[in-house]
Amino acid sequence: MIISPVKNMEKVSIVKCENYEHDNVKNAIRKSLDLIGGLPKFVKPGNTVLLKVNAIIGFPAERAATTHPAVVRAMAELVKEAGGIPLVGDSSGAYGFTGQSLEMCGLKKAAEDAGAKLVNFESTGTYSVKVNGKVVITLNIAKPVIDCDVLISMPKLKTHQLTKYTGAVKNFYGVIPGTGKAAIHRLAPSEESLSQAVVDIYSALKPRLAVMDGIVGMEGEGATNGTPIDSKVIISSADCVALDAVASEVMGFYHKDILTTRYAHEQGLGVGMLDKIDVAGENIKDVRLDFKKSKYMVYKFPEFLRKFMFGFAENISSVEISEDDCKRCGICVKSCPSAAIALEPRPFIDQKKCIKCYCCHELCPNGALELKTSFIGRQFMKRMNYKS
């Protein structure tokens, strides 16, 4: 008996890709897009097409913290072949470092090699956009994100120490340039509130497509301090929320535990439930990997409990700076939303000011910041049977 496919299911494609060799990557992306209707379905001749990459703070490509330049180059070439005009853009996690970041992680050269225009969101100006958000209601969004004809998310397959997973939806956090990200972190320091803030940002955008670099992902202390892991996939979808539901399952998460996916689904911004997604190409079970999750598991506590614990035992968790490893580059000071960090007379974090957003840990290029849980916190997690 032939069973007809369920109508109105969102489609996500998974295609295997063994390495970052140019032809392999380009063929894998082309195949992944053909499985969801083909690139001409999304890009018409003459369209300006913004590839929103993840440049974060300019780590080398082999660190697996940023969208790999081979994936960006291949995608930009495919856009040109479809008649589109490709742009490659982002803003760094640290204000003032976007230009360096795009160059250091190889994305500037990838854009040049593909004949795409590189766009630094810190220098393009912004539009003030009102949203019906639950955490933020006014956003300053980089102009190219609004002005382009086709917006495409190009995230990296990674864990995240606060939101557990970062993918196609959270990739759009980078459309807020300058000090805007720090301001949002002040408003939204917890997993729940930050996830909702990310969804608020996403609600202001109209991405047409997402293509994820999952050839080498990151496990453990993501989004920058984890370990590269061969995951060997390209994942594509017209729905960023659906892509995230599938990609998180590929990593070994339960998709409903990813709050950005759940909230976006509940707010009608995409399809975030696997039973409503048609997965084409590889089956999830055939490519699933058990990514190591963050050892820092305070995000597992309910928000009311975290507030209680932090309120009465502020040292139950902390981020600390290694004086030996710190190079005093100042990135952590510029990116700290609560102005809790000083480098003189010695590197120091004021734990009373720290809001546990972990921006400093994520953005430090020298690995000088360490997440720590106190004895009380470790014992509590043990008693509650939380496992990392």
Image (cartoon, grey):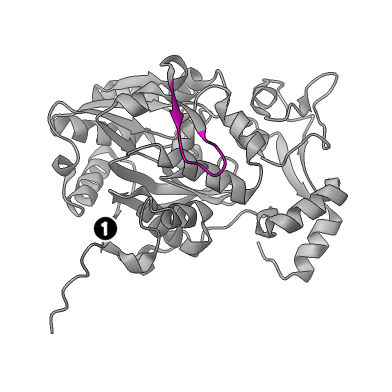
The amino acid type of the residue labelled 1 equals Lys
Q: Position of residue 11 (x, y in %)?
A: 26, 58
Which stretch did the figure color magenta?
127-137
Q: Which residue is found at the position 16% from the left and 74% from the top? A: 4
Q: Was residue 349 drawn as part of the magenta stretch in this picture? A: no
Residue 176 horizontal side relative to residue 168, left or right: right
Report the front residue among 177 and 266.
Answer: 266
Q: Position of residue 63 (x, y in %)?
A: 51, 38
Residue 123 horizontal side relative to residue 341, left or right: left
Q: Quadrant of the N terminus?
A: bottom left
Q: Which residue is found at the position 69% from the left and 55% from the top? A: 303
Residue 377's place in the image compared with 190, above or below, is below
Q: Position of residue 355 (x, y in %)?
A: 73, 39
Residue 151's place in the image compared with 35, above or below, is above
Q: Residue furthest bottom?
A: 1
Q: Secondary structure at mark 1?
A: strand
Secondary structure mainly formed by the magenta segment: loop
Residue 14 occupies which quadrant of the picture?
A: bottom left
Residue 209's place in the image compared with 165, above or below, is above
The number of numbered badges drawn on the structure is 1
Q: Position of residue 40 (x, y in %)?
A: 14, 40
Report whether residue 55 is seen.
no
Residue occupied by mark 1? 11
Say few, some or many: other residues with alpha carbon within 10 Å of mark 1 (under 14 / 14 to 19 / 20 or more): many
Residue 327 occupies which quadrant of the picture?
A: top right
Q: Was residue 129 drawn as part of the magenta stretch in this picture? A: yes
Report whether residue 22 is seen.
yes
Q: Quadrant of the C terminus?
A: bottom right
Q: Which residue is found at the position 57% from the left and 58% from the top? A: 292
